[in-house]
């Protein structure tokens, strides 16, 4: 079977299979927060692709770093050579991260980063005489990637069920949607109940079987930048410590500066045992991901024989040279600070939408990882009918106007339709005005359909 994805201009069917949106135009070029298609139409990349192009498109420093490294050596295998870009990038990342996270393992993307975290966690448990621990608790809904290990943690039964016989069905606890708590319950009370659900699950599963808890500190595709009150994060850390369960933060989307801190963990002063990073790490210029952890964990695994893991492209010199140039851009132009400042501006502007559009549930997130959900009832969070395809409908209205926002639905829409507005960290206030103008226009075009569906439901 073939798709009808546009081929290089000869009107032949594409030879690539599974292009999720085959009717999209062919991209031509990118610069800053903008992309152009081959017909010259301009798009604002208001979600940085899937929250990846953090320093924007067409960056000169990155191009030059890539070229410079390619002229020396693009690739040398880890078993055969050390390489300087990887050594330096590892040190530069750990210098940005909270104390105690001082060791890095490089892979090629988010799913690989998550796999490295859970495999290292498992080897640490074995090395410390706790071989009965293998279960990794995660949240429902959540997104941790699509390789079988990462998918088994992803809280989305639709993605899981087909592959279930091939995977471990790791336990899930509810993600903390505190906005839609029962009437009369305080927000902190709701947050505490969600965090205590972790303790209950650990006990129910059998403490000696639970290896780790993985969560996105700021939600991504599955929950549209969901955060919880502060108390949730400290209680989760406390529960993990109490039961000897490792805490993994999946910062594939929220890390590398997007939230206005290098790691979003810093917003809550909680240090996880392991962190998965990718996306913004190389800002989309090359595939790069990382597992970040402590020398205590690494040393213990090393003493027991070393980390049994690796990929052909782990710590590739050219990918790490790009990673260094991307980080240098962040530091030289204070992009993490800009994410915090512009995030406050953009969040305020998004909050302004709540007055006109009653079908927006809440505005969520930190820094430039911001999102909103579209629902039928703001008090209860009741979803719109799934057949309305609100997530596809609204993002198409935006796309038609040259605005790219990210949308997704999980759990068959039971938690509403999710949208992420997460422009590159170089975004300016004027560009936020441009984004908002087009977004309001798209929402106004979508509103009659949403209102008709709400009235009929
Ligand atoms: C939080 C999170 N974890 C893991 C992944 C998987 O990353 P990748 O698509 O690079 O494998 C993603 C991708 O969106 C993500 O958002």
Image: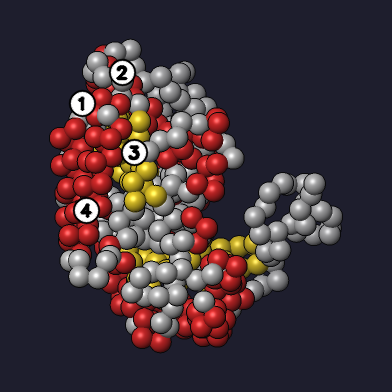
Q: Residues within 10 Å of mark 4 (few under 14, many from 20)?
A: some
Location of residue 312 with respect to 44 vertically, above or below: above
Label whose residue precedes the other's in the sequence (3 or 1): 3
Q: CA distance from mark 2 to mark 3?
A: 17 Å
The residue positioned 40% from the left and 58% from the top of the image is: 223
Residue marked by disc 2: 131
Q: CA distance from mark 1 to mark 4?
A: 32 Å
Q: What label does residue 193 carry, if any? A: 4
Label whose residue precedes the other's in the sequence (1 or 2): 2
Residue marked by disc 1: 296
Q: Secondary structure at mark 1?
A: helix
Q: Residues within 10 Å of mark 1 (few under 14, many from 20)?
A: some
Label whose residue precedes the other's in the sequence (3 or 4): 3
User: In this rendering, would 131 be left or right of 376?
Assistant: left
User: In this rendering, would 278 be left or right of 45?
Assistant: left
The quadrant holding residue 21 is bottom right
- Residue 447's x, y, as percent? 52, 83
The residue positioned 65% from the left and 67% from the top of the image is: 37
Q: CA distance from mark 3 to mark 1?
A: 23 Å
Q: In the image shown, does 18 or 94 lie closer to the viewer?
A: 18
- The reply to whether the residue tagged 2 has its Cβ within 8 angstroms of ligand 1 is no
Label whose residue precedes the other's in the sequence (1 or 4): 4
Q: How is the image coloured?
A: secondary structure
Q: What label does residue 137 carry, if any? A: 3
- Residue 228's x, y, as percent? 26, 59
Label whose residue precedes the other's in the sequence (2 or 3): 2
Label whose residue precedes the other's in the sequence (2 or 4): 2
The quadrant holding residue 345 is bottom left
């Amino acid at each position: 079977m073939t798709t009808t994805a546009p081929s290089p201009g000869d009107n032949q069917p594409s030879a690539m299979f599974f292009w999720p949106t085959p009717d999209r135009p062919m991209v031509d070029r990118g610069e800053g927060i903008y992309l152009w298609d081959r017909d010259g139409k301009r798009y604002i990349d208001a979600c940085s692709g899937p929250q990846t192009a953090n320093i924007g498109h067409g960056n000169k420093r990155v191009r030059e770093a890539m070229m410079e490294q390619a002229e020396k050596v693009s690739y040398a295998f880890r078993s055969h050579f050390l390489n300087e870009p990887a050594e330096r990038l590892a040190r530069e990342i750990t210098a940005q991260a909270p104390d105690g996270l001082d060791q890095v393992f490089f892979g090629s993307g988010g799913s690989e980063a998550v796999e490295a975290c859970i495999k290292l966690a498992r080897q640490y448990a074995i090395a410390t005489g706790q071989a009965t621990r293998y279960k990794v608790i995660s949240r429902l809904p959540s997104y941790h990637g699509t390789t079988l290990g990462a998918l088994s943690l992803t809280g989305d039964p639709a993605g899981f069920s087909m592959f279930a016989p091939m995977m471990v069905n790791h336990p899930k606890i509810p993600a903390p949607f505190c906005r839609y708590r029962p009437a009369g319950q305080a927000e902190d009370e709701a947050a505490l109940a969600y965090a205590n659900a972790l303790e209950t699950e650990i006990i129910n599963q059998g403490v000696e079987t639970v290896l780790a808890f993985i969560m996105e500190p700021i939600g991504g595709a599955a929950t549209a930048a969901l955060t919880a009150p502060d108390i949730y994060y400290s209680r989760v850390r406390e529960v993990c410590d109490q039961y000897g369960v490792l805490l993994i933060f999946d910062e594939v989307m929220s890390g590398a500066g997007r939230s206005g801190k290098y790691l979003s963990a810093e917003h809550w002063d909680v240090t996880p045992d392991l962190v998965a990073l990718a996306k913004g790490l190389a800002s989309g210029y090359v595939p790069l991901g990382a597992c970040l952890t402590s020398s205590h964990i690494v040393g213990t695994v090393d003493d027991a024989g070393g980390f049994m893991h690796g990929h052909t492209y782990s710590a590739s010199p050219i990918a790490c040279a790009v990673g260094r140039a991307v980080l240098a851009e962040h530091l030289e132009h204070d992009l993490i600070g800009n994410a915090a400042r512009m995030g406050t501006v953009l969040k305020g502007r998004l909050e302004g939408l709540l007055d006109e559009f009653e079908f927006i549930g809440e505005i969520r997130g930190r820094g430039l990882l911001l999102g909103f959900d579209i629902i039928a009832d703001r008090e209860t969070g009741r979803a719109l009918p799934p057949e309305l395809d609100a997530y596809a409908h609204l993002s198409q209205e935006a796309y038609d106007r040259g605005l790219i926002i990210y949308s997704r639905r999980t759990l068959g829409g039971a938690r509403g339709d999710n949208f992420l507005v997460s422009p590159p960290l170089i975004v300016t206030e004027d560009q936020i005005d441009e984004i908002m103008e087009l977004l309001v226009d798209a929402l106004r075009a979508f509103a009659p359909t949403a209102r008709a569906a709400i009235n009929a439901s």
